[in-house]
Amino acid sequence: MVSEIRYSDDELLISRFEDFLEEFGYAQLIPTLSDFYPDERSLVIEYNDLNKYSDEIMGLLQFHPNNFFHCIEEAVKRLMPVKNLERGALLHVRINDAPKRNSIIVRELRAKHLGNFIAVEGRASRVTEVKPRLVDAKFKCLRCGAILKEHQEDLFFKEPLECYEEQNGCKRTAASTKFKLLSEESTFVDTQKLEIEENPEGKRGGAQPQRLVAYVEDDIVGDINPGDRISLVGTLRTTQKAWPTKSNMFETFLEVNNISHEQHDFEEFEPTEDEKKEFLKVSEDPRLYDKIKGSIAPAIYGYPIEKEALALQLFGGVAKTLSDGTKVRGDIHILLVGDPGTAKSQLIRYISKMAPRGSFTSGKSASAAGLTAAVVKDDFGEGRWTLEAGALVLADKGHACIDELDKMSKNDTSALHEAMEQQTISIAKAGVNAKLLCRCALLAAANPKLGRFSATESKGEQIDLPPALLSRFDVILPFTDKPNKDLDGRIAQHILNNHYVGEILRHGGEGISQAQIEKRNELAEQSVPYLDRDFLKRYIAYAKRNVFPVLSQEAIDLIKDYYVNIRNKSEQKAKDDGGSTTIPITARQLEAFIRLAEASARTRLSHEVRKQDASRAINIVEHYLHQVAGEDGSFDIDIIATGMSKPQADRKRVIRAIVKSLGDNGRMFHIDKVIAMARDEGIDKGQTETLMKRMHQRDGIIYEVRTGSGEFRYAGN
Ligand code: ADP
Ligand code: MG
């Protein structure tokens, strides 16, 4: 227990600190500090040393930090050779490595903590530019010319109350003279304002994250980027709200003494020795892979391949730097796109809770920063520009789940390309130049263009996202909702069972028969994950942090053969049919295979990617390509890479030439004429109609004179 003391006698305290500095070897560091002064002006003291030294001193630090820092800084100054230190110049003592267990969660900060020295952890969500703050102001009395010093305490500008006699002034009051600020002769200190947001791990359910404002000053400014995971120590202070009127409500902020960045990935999931043993035991279970798949949203019926892909995404591939310095991401990006009511949102919500450092947002994000980042000027910055982190930046080193991706803002769409591939977001606006990191796996959900998949176009063409963005997803999974008596029955039974179990649980004991309870127990089984969700979360974090599998020769061969084969087949088919060659897959998919295979090896904590891992990866990518880029039994990756299949692009060129020739000079033409001419070129009626509709509704190359008339004019050039 720390005792609460407050020395009224500063001299006594200072001498105790001098004693402390000698005993723990800090006194020896002071001459070096002095040599580099004022470029270096902080002496860093280990928290543990203080702890070892005296409980009283710890109590002083915790409850009376002002007194503590005033005296210890004075002690340091006295130990410093005087030659280049003018008394009163800035010098800081900073406390390092306050133990995590002492830190207070932002949500739990209360009035009793005011004025205390505390440690908090979180992510920086907003960071302002660095601006100077006035600390020691010099004023000139315009009546008598005396130069007056006025120390500035907090954020409010303080002028002298009178022309101080003890500073050789004329004693006139502020009302009968004027003071001019001499900014050149005043002392300023760099300041920066931050907002830190509690870590999502600590927050309850979907609660809004709690935030805390912090001020950083002097030599430690400029070290933090939005999205960084940091812990801060400092004094919790208050300011009175002065607007619109002076109020009894106070705002709290942290006056930062020291910052430390997170040292390791997933620090919060540090396993115990026993837990490690448990992980290793589980990793040897031959049925582990099935159990993991079965633990993904068991309340949702079906979707075996989809769940498998999501399971692999949780484990992720290996991020690497190639020998030429290029960085390749290991994170797997997945897009779920499909009809409404097919449990997409439910799935990604589940994943966001199960993934270590998972976060959930909607594409229609409310904050100015949206999904990526923004530079804004608002109240927070107090006149400064603020760099604000969006959802992906805040999800750095985590798992970002974004629902309704198709509803994101234009701004985000363009920044997302870089975010997904390079995993950085560059911002250059208003003099703020920053590169923020967003090393996270992205799981997104979107609806098709018309809200529901239509049968006329291939699925890949109905995704309302720019092709450049689509092709950056490793896996795209369509969810269709077609009536199917057999499947519908099973899904309905599954959903009804879940609700039934929920109802009985809610109802409690009374009036429930034994038979009902037995039925409940039996049914409840079906939706219990094989592996406990929290256990799996920790297992995944452990795997991501410690396991970096390497491709075996077998796996390499399998992936290579598949890749070469499928590209060859398409070329062969084109020769046989006499059509043009389609591109079935590109090197992008090759990377997807590798990442998925690595993730599969990670599931059993294996350091080697084996054949089975490679074939799982191939299975998943093949499934997705069939669904999304399937064209006459083979694949055509152009549907994803350009938004249109290659034969379709060829057909479009033909139709375009036809409408251009017919509609030349503003002439009107009928769709039947186009259909007839296209038929001569081997394009059937349905295809022509689809393409005409597209040119009309989307590209605006043609327009219909009167809706439904079938008469068109050419508007392109
Ligand atoms: P989406 O985001 O695809 O529009 P939701 O996730 O909002 O759909 O799902 C709507 C509801 O339908 C959810 O309550 C979900 O539980 C239920 N549902 C849909 N498909 C299934 C399924 N296969 N198994 C269990 N529940 C399902
Ligand atoms: Mg939804």
Image: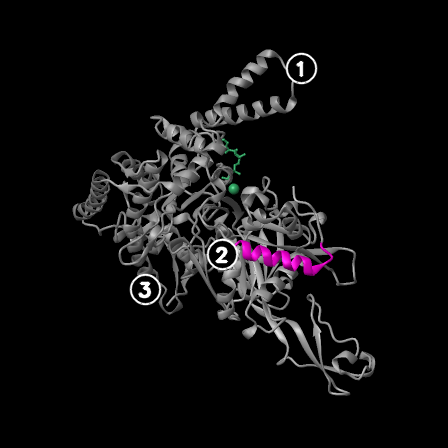
Q: Amino acid at mark 1?
A: Gly
**Mark 1 closeness class: few <14, some 14–19, many ≥20 residues within 10 Å:** few
- Tell which circle, 1 or 3, labels the residue nearer the N-terminal end: 1
Report if the beta carbon of the residue with label 2 is closer than 8 angstroms to ligand 2.
no
Q: Which type of secondary structure does the marked residue at label 1 adopt?
A: loop
Residue visible at 34% across and 64% down?
A: 660
Q: Amino acid at mark 3?
A: Ser
- Tell which circle, 2 or 3, labels the residue nearer the N-terminal end: 2
Q: Position of residue 119 (x, y in %)?
A: 59, 50
- Of residues 43 and 190, the one drawn nearer to the viewer in this rendering: 43
Q: Quadrant of the C terminus?
A: bottom left
How is the protein colored in the picture?
one colour
Q: Is residue 14 magenta?
A: yes
- Tell which circle, 1 or 2, labels the residue nearer the N-terminal end: 2
- Residue at numbered disc 2: 372
- Stretch in magenta: 7-25
Q: Quadrant of the N terminus?
A: top right
| The disc label shown at residue 511, or none | 1
**Mark 2 closeness class: few <14, some 14–19, many ≥20 residues within 10 Å:** many
Q: Nearer the viewer, mark 1 or mark 3?
A: 1
Would you say residue 567 is visible in this rendering?
Answer: yes
- Residue 626 occupies quadrant: top left
- Residue at numbered disc 3: 661
Extreme top residue here? 514
Q: Amino acid at mark 2?
A: Thr
Q: Position of residue 384 (x, y in %)?
A: 60, 68
